[in-house]
Amino acid sequence: MSEPVVLVSARNLRKQFGAVFAARDITVDIHAHSVSGLIGTNGAGKTTFVNMLTGYLKPDQGQIFFDGHEITGRPPREITRMGITRSFQIPQLFDSLTALENVETALGIVGKPLEQAEEILARFELTPFADALAGILPEGVRKLLDIALAMVADPRVLLLDEPTSGVDSSEKFEIMDRIMKIVREAEVTAMFVEHDMEVVRRYSDRVLAFYDGSILAAGAPEEVMRDEKVLEYIIGRPLQAGRPAQAQVVQEGAHA
Amino acid sequence: MLMLPAAIIDGIMYAAWLFLVAVGLTLIYGVMKILNLAHGAFYTLGAYVAATFVGFWLAGDYNPYYSYLLLLLAGVIGGLVLGVLVERGILRRFYKEDQVVLLLVTYAIFLILEDVVKMIWGVEPYVISQPYGLLGSFNIGLLYYPNYNFVILGAAILSGVGLALFLKLTRPGKLLRVVIHDREISMALGINVQRYFLVTFVAGSILAALGGALTAPTISVAPEIGVEVIVLAFAVIVIGGLGSLPGAALGALIVGLVRSFAVHYFPEVELFSIYAVMAVVLIVRPMGLFAAAEPRKI
Amino acid sequence: MKSSSTMHARQRARRPQHALIALVVTLILIALGIGLSTWQFVVVVALSKGLAALGLVLLLRCGLVSFGQGLYYCAGAYAVGMAMSHLGIRDLVPLLLLATVSAAVIAALLGVLLSRYRDIFFAILTLAFTMILYGLLIRNPVLGGSDGFNVQSPTFFLLADGALSRRTMFIITAVVVGVSIWAVQRFLATPMGRLGPAMKDNEIRVEYLGASARRNIFWNYTLAGALAGLGGGLTSFSIGHIDPDLAFWTTSGEFLFIAILGGTRNAYAPFLGAIALELIRSLAFQYVPNSWQIVIGVSMLVIIIFLPGGLISIARLWLRSAARGA
């Protein structure tokens, strides 16, 4: 097994919104071909981190490197062209175009032949929706289409912002299976923001736990999910003996 | 040497007229987020109704001093009737459309109303200059100004202060301020935003018609007077800030003074200067000098 | 699943023959113009305005409403007029080139600025700029002031022994329009051309796919200005007179109406709208001379409510059923 290469690294990222510290001195390395799960309560800084990585926000201080190049503060379209793409918590699609046309648009921008559109849809098992307008598709399909668009550019790093939020719990794992299969086949380095601990446990090699703008813990899922601080601030503990029923609810973590 | 005070006084007088004409437009935008191109047509209508009322009155040999009351009445009645007709009859069907479609809708309404005016009053201009000259004039050295200008100045101040007090002190006024500030929050608070649309549109229409009515004695009332007024009003409210009342006053002052100085010192740039200032403000500070709306700028 | 993908592949392969269609349409227009000489003037003016509206269609597809196409229309017309009177150029080709290029240059300069604005601010800013030109022209005696000035007929290569006849001018206009339609249809088939509706839907997504919305809008805006300038140049010959009213906001408003009436589906739509408008206007003028603006205003509202796709959507349905029935 070869030495894992660091693909993305963040150094001392700081970001403040008024009195809120969305990022306090974040330093982390992401290795090539890894799948990292980002967990944390709302407002902990996960999405800010993703936004800084993809160019939506400029850090107040600190640097971000991708494959040796500095990408701090560059606009989204440059970062996309360099190889980092993202999907969105609320799918960003072209609602008045069909699913097929959505993919064709992405292909056109990237400069690839439009004929590949059907194959891309097929890979995500979205072919039945090819001629339906994106605006009226069911939420799970929209999410997949959003991710498909992000994959059109053959990125090296893919960031998924809450890929299973708003999706039925019965479908969550099916969708994540589909996504992760494609991610691993394409050897893409992935990071996903998630609230569902079971999803995180199943699909990530590595977990980054955010709290109040800092990374509380980073490491293998089992380690991080048992870390004292993580349990205290993010996942929650079972209540003291005497109330087993409620303990069940709390143990499901940040699902409030 | 007389140029400077003349330019300043002219500028202030013109600014008062501009404010009167533009304040309704900014109010409608502030509450309804609609840039009402038909505003020019309400102005025109106010002028025609005034011409009709006053023409009638003066022909009947009644006391000419009551003609001022008639001017006010013309503005209020004209604006009220037309405002209700247009809002209920046409405008409200398009509220779900986006801002730019609504702009085109108001443009269509403008075209329709221009011809309605022609149909009712014909194309020949009307002149009712008596109220203009009746009040005499005052002198500052060699410069003389008709006292009628004070009517316009007074009307501008009254409407500005009146609106400001209404928005600040009365309950419906305060609710309107919330709607102007953020429509979504006001709906979340349970404010029936659409009910306020009718009131606002009618108020704006009355103000426009009042502007036209009070201007009527100073011009020759013809069908095309609305077309130039609308862009001037646009310039005023854009400079001051769309939806802002103090902005309209500041915008009027700026446009008034700029135009006045141009007229006195560089007549060739009179029109150009107004729109140049408008463009500069839009570029440098798109939300206007008193921000009440956010710009969509990348 | 296989059949769906081959269906799409077949659809894509059936690339429309843009040049052929444009040629046919041009020939039809020429035939109409020669056949119905009474309508010749109306149609030639409509075609010139249609060019300005075609530029506007490009912008509307990106989601931008411009009240400033008149600026370029006027600039093109004045470029022609001034080149004729001050530079002595009388030949058609250099004059039209001058009109198009000067308009394009101004559009490029303003486009750098305007491509950063959207929605109502874009609309108002374009209105401000066209009124600036109006203000400059109307008080400028050198450029004719508020009366403007007259423009003679141009010469054209072989027919150099005199000015062009109205009929020849009509044919030339039709050909220029045909070529423009072909060029724009080709443009709309390129990746940049297809980006318009996507930008209108979701500009953020476009940026995150790696394209620059601003650059796209810049090119669309410059092309729109060039088309309007070309239209302005043609119109100066056809009407024989130019004045600052071309830059007044109501001229731009008329282009806007033409674009909405015609639709924004393709490059033919605005010409359909322009001819329809001129026909409506001529008829309304004959029968209800003081109410033709009411007719236009009501038509606009009707189109917005009932036919947001414009007349071209009816035309396409009709053509499609005719093709199926044939």
Image: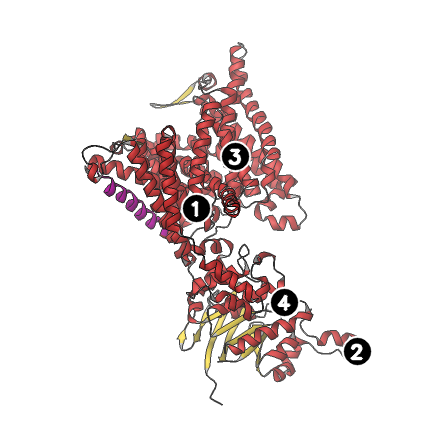
Q: Which mark is residue C57?
A: 1
Q: Are marks 1 and 2 in contact (CB under 8 Å)?
A: no
Give how far apart the Cα atoms at labels 3 and 1 are. Answer: 19 Å
Q: Say which chain tag 3 marks.
A: C
Residue at left offset 21%, top offset 34%: C85
Residue at left offset 47%, top offset 63%: A106
C64 versus B202 height, above or below: below
Mark 2 packing: few (<14 Cα in 10 Å), some, or many (20+)?
A: few
Residue at left offset 41%, top offset 55%: C189
Q: Which residue is mark 4?
A: A165
**Residue C68 in view (yes/no):** no
Tell me, yes or no, whether the highlighted magenta stretch contains residue C134: no
Q: Which residue is mark 2?
A: A244
Q: Which contiguous range is marked in magenta? A: C89-111
Give how far apart the Cα atoms at labels 1 and 2 are. Answer: 66 Å
Please tell me in which quadrant of the rendered image residue A251 appears: bottom right
Mark 3 element type = helix
Give coordinates of residue A101: x percent, y percent.
51, 59
The amino acid pointed to by label 1 is: Val
C54 versus A150 height, above or below: above
Mark 4 element type = loop
